[in-house]
Image (cartoon, rainbow, N blue to C red):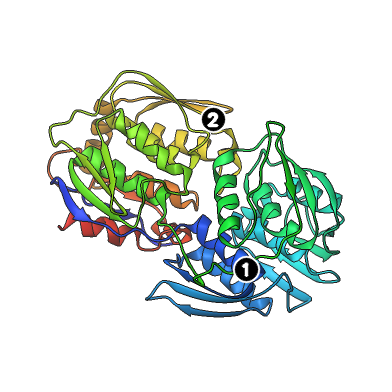
Amino acid sequence: MSDPLSINPITHALDSTLALPGSKSITNRALILAALAEGETRLEGALFSRDTRIMLAALDILGFETMVDEPAETIIVKGLGGQIPCQQAAIDVGNAGTAARFLTAFLALSRGGEYRLDGDAAMRERPMAGLLDALIALGAADFEFHGQPGHFPFTLKARGYRAGEAVVDARASSQILSALLLSAPVGAAVQLVCPEVRPHYVAITLKMREAFGSARVETNDSGRFDLPQIRYMPPPSGHYAIEPDISAASYFLALTLIHGGKLHIPHLSADPLQGDAHFVEVLAHHGLRVDAERQEWIASCSETNDPQRGHREIDFSAISDTFLTYAAIAPLLGESVRITGIGHTRHQETDRIAGMAAELSKLGQLVKEEPDALIIQPKPNELRARALKARSDGQLLAIDTYEDHRFAMSFAVLASYDLLGDGKPWLAIKDPECCAKTFPGFFQALDQLRHV
């Protein structure tokens, strides 16, 4: 692990254009859909990060033909209509939740195939049982566990999907339902009943299925999905454009709020696929404005804006990847906030509620954990006092990141604030390389804004 990275504050209002990388969630969905389709698909604007490289490597191991042009951000995948060339393989999914769940459901199509799957130590703790139970119920796979039942590592013995119904427990992660929505109906007509799931990432999956030739899927209040057997086809143009990562945009929207000025983010529409676009509404309360025009977002905030407001309670259940962005800058936002709807984030790359409580407490903030929520009482004077104390000791305050990219990027936004008014670093980020999971060039992008 590298030394902590000290963050130089930004000492001017923003006035720049920043092109964001493609969405990890959309890139990995597109890779699965392209492999399932009959024929060649060119993915444009693809993300090249740890998680998407894991998915690409898995497709290569499984015998798919892929052509990668990383500078051009394109990937060409030759799909085989639901066939998987290699009947045996060993795949390491690292700590990539999308790869873990999407590949597991995908491999179940390969009747007679046998695949050993494993991941990082953190991945071995992440929930998989809801997906595995559904695959067993659909007759699609049997599993031999080599550790804790219901978790990695395991050997998947593929049986192929058969027509039928399964109740799906996707409370731990909507990826569990999305994995089945992508792959199961290629094998057979199935009915999935999933009454409790966060809907926004599922909506991305359903819209992307339509782009690859699937009929619209209707669901009802009971969470029932009736899925006829389908054949995916490449989009009519042969190309699929991957939307920029709006979770990544959250960091730069927060930067614009705390520094003022204007930031242009190209290739984002007024009606994006990603539900994290609603984070804009959270920051609008503090004075941020975002205009969407000509496939570009323009974020702006007055340099004289005071973002401090009274106590708030905000439900982040639909935009939980952005709660860390907001929590990290909470010391600058005035009164207390109760962030709710985030219980499931205890089972992501790390326990994000506990981790955020620990790091904010280090910075002198008053924090209370609840099973599904986090209450933050900002103490800006205590933050400054601790930063000055560390500086007087010849050190900087330092943030632990728990091998979780969102901790690194969120606290880097706070660190960019000129807390002590001298333009010098006061906060450092441990293990900054963890950003490679979704945004390898994050700190370079931050530097770009600092020097414009």
| Circle 2: residue type | Gly
Q: x%, y% of residue 401?
A: 45, 49
The residue drawn where x is 16% and y is 58% is 451
Whether residue 417 is visible? no
Q: Quadrant of residue 30?
A: bottom right
Q: Quadrant of the N terminus?
A: bottom left
Which of the labelled discs sits on residue 375, or is there none? none
Q: Is residue 1 left or right of residue 3?
A: right
* Distance (Cα) linking label 2 and label 1: 37 Å
Q: Quadrant of the C terminus?
A: bottom left
Q: Judge by depth and name the residue closer to the eye, 59 or 385.
A: 59
Q: Judge by depth and name the residue closer to the eye, 118 or 46.
A: 46
Q: x%, y% of residue 14?
A: 17, 48
Above-or-below relation of 446 to 43: above
Q: x%, y% of residue 282?
A: 37, 32
Above-or-below relation of 354 to 33: above
Q: Judge by depth and name the residue closer to the eye, 313 or 354.
A: 313
The residue drawn where x is 65% and y is 41% is 172
Identify the residue under disc 1: 233
Tell me, yes or no, whether the two marked residues, 2 and 1, touch with CB atoms within 8 Å: no
Whether residue 230 is visible? yes
Q: Is residue 244 left or right of residue 102?
A: left
The residue drawn where x is 12% and y is 43% is 422
The residue drawn where x is 82% and y is 59% is 161
Q: Is residue 99 left or right of residue 164?
A: left
Q: Secondary structure at mark 1?
A: loop
| Circle 1: residue type | Met
Residue found farthest to the top = 310
Which of the labelled discs sits on residue 341, or is there none? 2
Crowd class of label 1 (few under 14; some 14 to 19; many from 20; radius 10 Å): many
Q: Judge by depth and name the residue closer to the eye, 32 or 379.
A: 32
